[in-house]
Image (tube, rainbow, N blue to C red):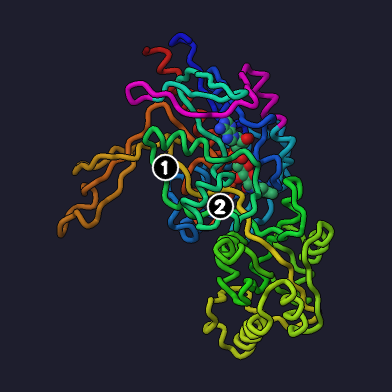
Amino acid sequence: MSQSTQPVVVCGGGLAGLSAAVTALEAGAEVTLIEKSPYLGGTALLSGGTLWTFKEYDKIRELIPAGDPALQWVVHDTLPGARAWLQGLGVKFEDIGQMLHVGHGHVMDPVGAIGLLGARFKAIGGQLHLETGLHSLVMREGVVTGVRALHDGRIHDITAGAVVIATGGFQGNPELLGRYVLREPNNLMLRSNYWSTGDGFIAATQIGAAASPGLNTFYGHALAAPPARVDNTQFREAGQHHGRLCVAINMNGERFADETESTGEEAINQALAHQPGGLCFYVMDDDHMEQMSMQGRGALIRVILARCQKIGATVLQADTLETLCAAMALHGVPEARALATLKDFNAALEGGRADELRPARLGNRKPLRKPPFRAIHVKAAITFTMGGLAVDERARVLWRSGTTSHYAPVPTERAFVDQSAQGEGASTAIGHFYRQMPVQGLYAAGNDVGNISHFAYMGGLASALTMGRNAGRNAATLASVRKRVP
Ligand SMILES: Cc1cc2nc3c(=O)[nH]c(=O)nc-3n(C[C@H](O)[C@H](O)[C@H](O)COP(=O)(O)OP(=O)(O)OC[C@H]3O[C@@H](n4cnc5c(N)ncnc54)[C@H](O)[C@@H]3O)c2cc1C
């Protein structure tokens, strides 16, 4: 392929990849999109379609302080414009609604949105290769110049002016999960498309790209545990979403985390993954039944339990906590220990000693009082890995190795002030910096970008859409410069 026809190559055709591809096309680039599966859409096709993030940027920083502030800003600041762009393509949104207790968003039909993006991509000249997966990256003199793609068992080289990696994270790869997230990857059910096995992360880190902080954190919701039968069209039926309202009892009969921590169910779900078998019972009383699973959106808990029973989930019901624990014992939970845990929980809340509970219970301090009591057997599940590639605010993937310098960084460079290296009274503006420079020609978007959400969650579709647009725009600019200056 000659220098004058170098395309932007986008790897992954989910919401992030499609947004990058269409944005790059609209900016005048030639674009080739490779997608490993037989269809476009990735996890967005399975999603609820709520395009949301926090209302206030300061609240993001308060609740997700370990996330990257610049990337969080990009998502928060560019989401309204990106949504308007989707509307311009014909995507319809419901009116704005509350999401969890800190966010707001608009619901779209995700299947329709992916269809419109795919149609737009083809209409303005995009080249699509389905069942074609990113295998590795091609480099020349430190610059990414293309990709090696696997199709039908054979490797094909595709030359690129710029490459966007949007392969959706590594939740489908037990080896990477075992290395970075938890010792027992089998403790996790996969609540995502099947294809996101970390190919983008592996290809980029193989050429020396940096991994982000937060590799051990992930987003997901507990699912009804086996024998419930959950295929990938049933994630929403089998998803619990109400962990923060329950008392979670592991297979040792113990509470193991503050069920109410963080913005939704992601904290208790992450803690659950580290419990034996990734299993627990969510225990609730009758007052729970008419509550919504998540503040503002979601289903009544009564509806969630009924749906889960239909797919074979273990849902127990009893008139006393004693008989509920006896029923849990038939599923392997030590009866006396579970009963002591529930009674201690109630006694602490009823006796004004809630602060003494260990693990803590900072929110939803209601004892289990009103029979009948219910317990559903649930298992931890992963939707996407929150860690991934280290990326700057222009979606450029960064080198792992940096250089140290005593000069203040230019704004587009990533810099970490090494406080220990600064002498007494040293200026914070000019300190001892560790600089990570961008890998020329390599961008990332969506779940392949690490450290936007970090332990707590600020919206997957919003991150995919905004970082996809960002990567597509910047990749197109670079590809056009490379065309003019061989
Ligand atoms: C049940 C459910 C409900 C959800 N609801 C919401 C919601 O309401 N709101 C919200 O914000 N988020 C929601 N999410 C999360 C959201 O869907 C994801 O965060 C988002 O779709 C991720 O987009 P992505 O483009 O990064 O990844 P994906 O959509 O997963 O796309 C990645 C694509 O890359 C492809 N791929 C993988 N490897 C390769 C390779 N080597 N080469 C080429 N292609 C490759 C995959 O096949 C896939 O098509 C939900 C998720 C689930 C499962």
**Residue sticking out furthest to the bottom:** 351
Residue labelled with disc 1: 390
* Kind of residue indicated by mark 1: Ala
* Picture coordinates of residue 405, whole percent (x, y): 21, 42
Q: Is residue 453 left or right of residue 191?
A: left
Which quadrant of the picture is home to ligand 1?
Answer: top right
- Judged by depth in the image, the label closer to the viewer, 1 or 2, is 1
* Kind of residue indicated by mark 2: Met
Q: Which residues are magenta?
A: 115-143
Q: Is residue 144 left or right of residue 141?
A: right
Residue labelled with disc 2: 458
Number of numbered discs: 2
Q: Which quadrant would residue 126 be assigned to in this image?
A: top right
* Picture coordinates of residue 5, whole percent (x, y): 49, 11
- Within the magenta stretch, is there residue 123? yes
Provide the secondary structure element on which disc 2 rests: loop
